[in-house]
Amino acid sequence: MNNEPLSFLSVYVFSAKEEVEFTVYNITYKKEEILNKTTLSKHKGVFLFILENEDLENNKLVKLKLKKELSKDMQAGVAGFKEKPLTLEIIKKPVVFDELLIESSRKDGNYTIYESHIKNAEINKQKYIAIAMFPDESFDFMSLYIGP
């Protein structure tokens, strides 16, 4: 128990109930996936990027590129699965789920690039990894890269 005063507290809760809509994108390890305005205009609910884990047990770099800066309220998580999460039933039961925190950001021309690492050893051991983004705004360009 912590009896010290807290200057900041962040609580992250996620529950994939039936009413949550996922837009699923199958992505490839070590390949930048680009989503343009046409693709993103069809987006509903939560972004779910799924990939086969080709580099078991090693930390992964997650690089997100946007034309605008992320809202401070946007949340992201990463999950590990034994099997490819193709159904809501599987999505609701990952082996392990963790918050994905932005570690750094930088400007590159008209883009802002955000970087994070998947450091959770249990996630990195799983055959499939999913990145879930819970946006509170719309995007007209997004790219995502996951690799070493």
Image (cartoon, grey):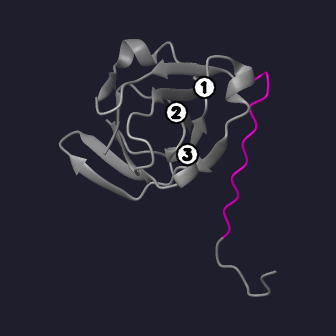
Between the C-alphas of marks 3 and 2, the distance is: 9 Å
Q: Earlier in the sequence, mark 1 or mark 3?
A: 1
Is mark 1 in CB contact (under 8 Å) with mark 3? no
If the image is split into quadrants, where does the C terminus sit? top left
Q: Amino acid at mark 1?
A: Glu
Left or right of 109: which side holds 139? right
> Height in image: 99 above or below 92?
below
Mostly what secondary structure, the magenta segment?
A: loop
- Segment colored magenta: 9-20
The question of residue 4 being in magenta is answered with: no
Identify the residue shown where x is 55% and y is 45%. 123
- Which structural element holds mark 3? helix
In the image shown, does 61 or 106 lie closer to the viewer? Answer: 61
Q: Amino acid at mark 2?
A: Lys
- Residue receiving disc 3: 123
- Which structural element holds mark 2? loop
